[in-house]
Image: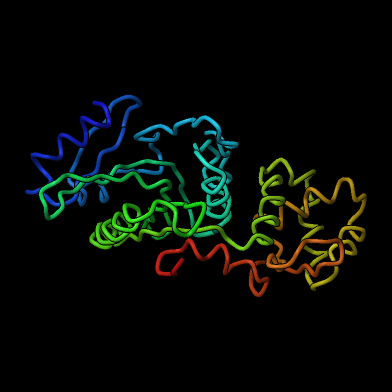
Amino acid sequence: MSDSGAVAGAVRSAGAWGFEAAFAPVAGRVVQWRWEQAAAAVRFEDLAPVSGFPALAGKRWGPGWWWSATSGRLVAHGSAAMRLRLMLLDRDPQVVGLSARAVRLVWREGDGRVRSWVPQLFARYADGSAMLVDCPAAGGAGGDAARRAARTLAEACGQVGWVYRRLGPPDPVMAANVRWLAGYRHPRHLGRTGLAQAVLEAFAERRPLVEGVRAVGDPLEVWPVVFHCLWSGRLGVELGEPLHERVLVGAGRTGSGQEQPAGLARPGVGA
């Protein structure tokens, strides 16, 4: 069934059932369930996009893929803002699953017209709850239609114990730092056996970054391991300030200053 077919199918059911969920359990085939039923039973984190990402002429950014350290799989994205939010969610320790455009919400408005909206991202949390996310490149992007849809999606998510967020651009310094660390997110950057443990021991007490690296051994071998540990949160650093060789690094995320920016994506925390 095409996307338009899924929306048309809601004409006969949205009034009776409220919100509907259209999704693609198999690539190229869209089905539509009651929203409450789908939210309880469907693993949206495993699904392909219910609709594709258009490649727009004149745009500097086109659709692409993000390799997720959380799931070990590729997640589609359609904009720079979306890719950045994928990075932040991928780094959140409470997130256990990620997907893009996994569901189309369909509903009938008071005037009888059927409306629909496809949130850009889906995030599953360790406690089983979930979040639907849109990633506007600027605060007012999408205009009135986006604001109306945001209110409706927040209502739909609230009915099933989820949250909906429009997450605008994060702090540019924090974003630049996470973008750099994301280049070291793959486990291959843990290095040889025992090296990661040596790195953690070197930073058991907070110290300047370069001093800890030199204490472990050859910087060419140690730097990738340190960056991987900073990405994963095994080491903590203040990401609201530019990374440099004298920045203070310590053990874990606690008190490191980077949880609040990433934590904006957690259920119950405003954007």
80 relative to 9 in the view: left or right: right
Residue 97's spot in the image, x, y percent? 46, 48
Quarter containing the N terminus: top left
Residue 230 rendering spot, x and y as whole percentages = 71, 58
- 123 left or right of 162? right
Q: Residue at x 77, y 50 (%)?
A: 225
Nearer to me, 221 or 6: 6
Number of marks = 0
Horizontal arrangement in the rendering, residue 4 relative to residue 221 (left or right): left
Up/down of 254 relative to 191, above or below: below
* 59 to 128, vertically: above or below: above
Q: Residue at x 79, y 72 (%)?
A: 206
Query: x%, y% of residue 42?
Result: 29, 43
Left or right, residue 87 beside residue 191? left
Q: In the rendering, at what x and y percent does residue 20 appear?
A: 20, 45
Quarter-of-image position of residue 144: bottom left
Viewer-nearest residue: 255 or 66: 66
| Residue name at image x 21 percent, y 34 percent | 6
The image quarter in which residue 173 lies: bottom right
Q: Give the colour scheme shown.
A: rainbow
Name the residue located 55 percent from the left edge and 45 percent from the top edge: 83
